[in-house]
Image (tube, rainbow, N blue to C red):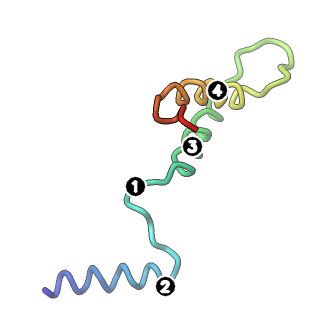
Amino acid sequence: MSPRQFRRQHKIEQDKLLGTFVRKHPSADALIGIIRESFEQVSETRKGKPEIPMEDALMSAFAMFSLKDPSLQRL
């Protein structure tokens, strides 16, 4: 093992012990959280006091489009 590989492996082990390990690729929950955060930044353009918040309406639309994928329709 080269010194560089050793340092990298040691850093990964330390991060795991400290609970600061960051995944290289976000999980599905993290990706949905990122999408929701971006939907929360969309300004409300509807008049009056809508019953359903804009971010909830956008999340519903996102769910409808994401469930169109054939791999998600098989239960």
Q: Residue at x 20, y 81 (%)?
A: 5
Task: Report the side of 6 relative to 45 (left or right).
Answer: left
Whole-percent x and y of residue 14?
Answer: 42, 85
Up-down relation of residue 8 to residue 47 (above or below):
below
What is the three-letter code of the residue carrying label 3?
Answer: Ile
Q: CA distance from mark 4 to mark 3?
A: 12 Å
Q: Residue at x 68, y 31 (%)?
A: 55
Q: CA distance from mark 1 to mark 2?
A: 20 Å
Q: Earlier in the sequence, mark 4 or mark 3?
A: 3
Q: Quadrant of the N terminus?
A: bottom left
Q: Foreground: 72 or 5?
A: 72
Callouts 4 and 3 close, C-beta under 8 Å: no
Q: CA distance from mark 4 to mark 2?
A: 38 Å
Tell me the element at label 4: helix
What is the three-letter code of the residue carrying label 2?
Answer: Leu
Q: What is the residue that sits farthest to the left in this orientation? A: 2
Q: Earlier in the sequence, mark 2 or mark 3?
A: 2
Which residue was labeled with disc 1?
A: 25
Which residue was labeled with disc 3?
A: 32
Q: CA distance from mark 4 to mark 1?
A: 24 Å
Up-down relation of residue 23 to residue 55 (above or below):
below
